[in-house]
Image (cartoon, helix red, strand yellow):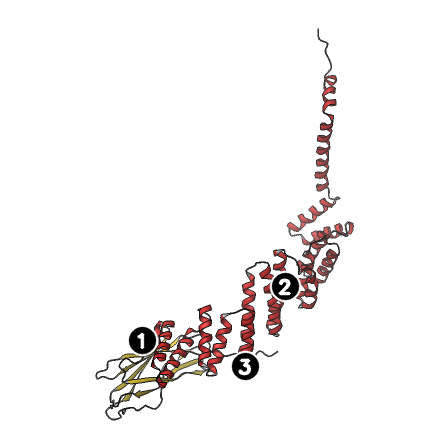
Amino acid sequence: MQENIPFFKKIIPFLNTYKIYIISIVIVVVLGFFADFSRENPTSFEGMVKKAENYYEKGQIAFALEEYKKIIRLYPKNYDVHRKLAELYKQLNEPEKAKAENIRAISAAPPYRYEAILALAKIYINEKRFDIAEDLIKNIKKTNRPELLKELGDIYYAAGEFYSAGDRLEAIRKFKKAYDFYKKAQNSLKNKALMKIHTLYAEIADTLASHNQNKEAENILNLSIEYKDNALAHYKLAKIYEKNSLAEKALKEYSKAFKMDSNIGNINSYAALLLKEAENFDKKGEKIKAELYRLKAKKINKKLDVPDNPDKKILFRLIAIKINEDIERDTLRPGIIFNITNITDKILNKIKVKVIFYEGNKPFNTKIISIANEEFPLKGDARTSDVSVYSDKFINHVFDEHDLWAKVYISQQEPDEWELFRNIPIMKEKRSILIKK
């Protein structure tokens, strides 16, 4: 008969066999228990941090601040706590204390932890002390980490924004550094920085050109193109060349500008200059070149896609486009000046001109002028004096953008049979403003 052995005696051999594994399990359980206890225990580091975080999450900033200050007294070299204190002081609008905590964090920083340096640099950026900010970040410029490169770009971009209102050349230098960092980070903000650079170069050129320093303006725009070819610089060069009667140079720059960006400026300027040059070639007898320039103009703007001289009896020549401004009444009045040449050897005694003024596609005024009649005929190979035609109606808001046109119809019949001779864009150039320091 089998003897009854007590349970504890039966389990002893089992415990002896597996004691190493059992001890290991017990240690893990005990350590886990104490880790949880430590995290919940407000006198431990983790417990104190959790308590501070709980205050912060509830919006009790003052209590959170006091808890972090207690922690830092016990752990004065803790990078993360110094950073948290710096952020709290920043939220409380105490920049000097935020600076101090960031400086302490920098001294305690583990390798490759740059948050404190960037945070401190941003404080100095907000204070417009860019030299200090730039000196701070010089030690992390060699990083390849995209998030840090983006932060560095942001710092230089902010500096560029500040200098834009005064020292535009210094602003360009800052934006160029921002562009380099954004580009290295493969961040799309590089395009925004690049546009700032192009715009600042163009603004400097506008100011110089407004003071007739055209060569200096040209040099500035060429610097812009040299840095990064761009449509805005070519467009501004075209305006300078056109202003100085350098039509061929202006046309080349217009062509480059609108090939790069069809929306960079008023394309009607390009078309109008092509038509003007076509007329000049007509006067020189270079009919093939004249027709080529007209075709280019018509290709640019379909509104111009009409014959210039349908019946070949007369030549219509546009002398000038005018916009009379009344600043006090905030109105403007468009007009054109032209003359007509009888290119036959016969007398013409029936010529009328009808000018319809448009804003966009909407006509707002029509003028009809008698050029030649039985009493005052136009002799063969003769030209009229210059004829000025202004709208009887005024356009409101001088400084607004206006899409103004004049359509010129001519009739040489009785009763009138009107033929469209010209579509003329009436453009008002923007004025450059000199910014005084």
Quadrant of the snapshot with the C terminus: bottom right
Query: Total label count?
Result: 3
| Three-letter code, disc 1 | Val
Left or right: where does residue 108 sit relative to residue 175?
Answer: right
**Looking at the picture, how far across and down is residue 157, in whole percent?**
60, 65
Write down the residue under mark 3: 215
Tell me: 406 left or right of 109: left
Residue at numbered disc 1 = 306
Residue pictured at 70% horizontal, 36% vertical: 32
Q: Secondary structure at mark 2?
A: helix
Residue wearing tag 2 = 155
Nearer to us: label 3 or label 2? 3
What's the amino acid at mark 2? Answer: Ile
The N terminus lies in quadrant: top right
Check disc 3 and give the amino acid type. Answer: Lys
Note whether residue 327 is visible.
Answer: no
Mark 3 / mark 1, whichever is N-terminal: 3
Which of the marked residues, 2 or 1, is nearer the chain's N terminus? 2
**Image quarter for residue 397?**
bottom left
Dot 3, how many residues are within 10 Å of its Cα: few (below 14), some (14-19), or many (20+)? few
Q: CA distance from mark 3 to mark 1?
A: 38 Å
Looking at the image, which residue is at 74% across and 26% down?
19
Query: Foreground residue, 372 or 31?
Result: 372
Between circles 2 and 1, the one closer to the viewer is 1
Image vertical order of residue 262 relative to residue 244, above or below: above
How many residues crowd around disc 2 within 10 Å: few (fewer than 14), some, or many (20 or more)?
Answer: many
Q: Secondary structure at mark 1?
A: loop
Label 3 to label 2, Cα distance in Å?
34 Å
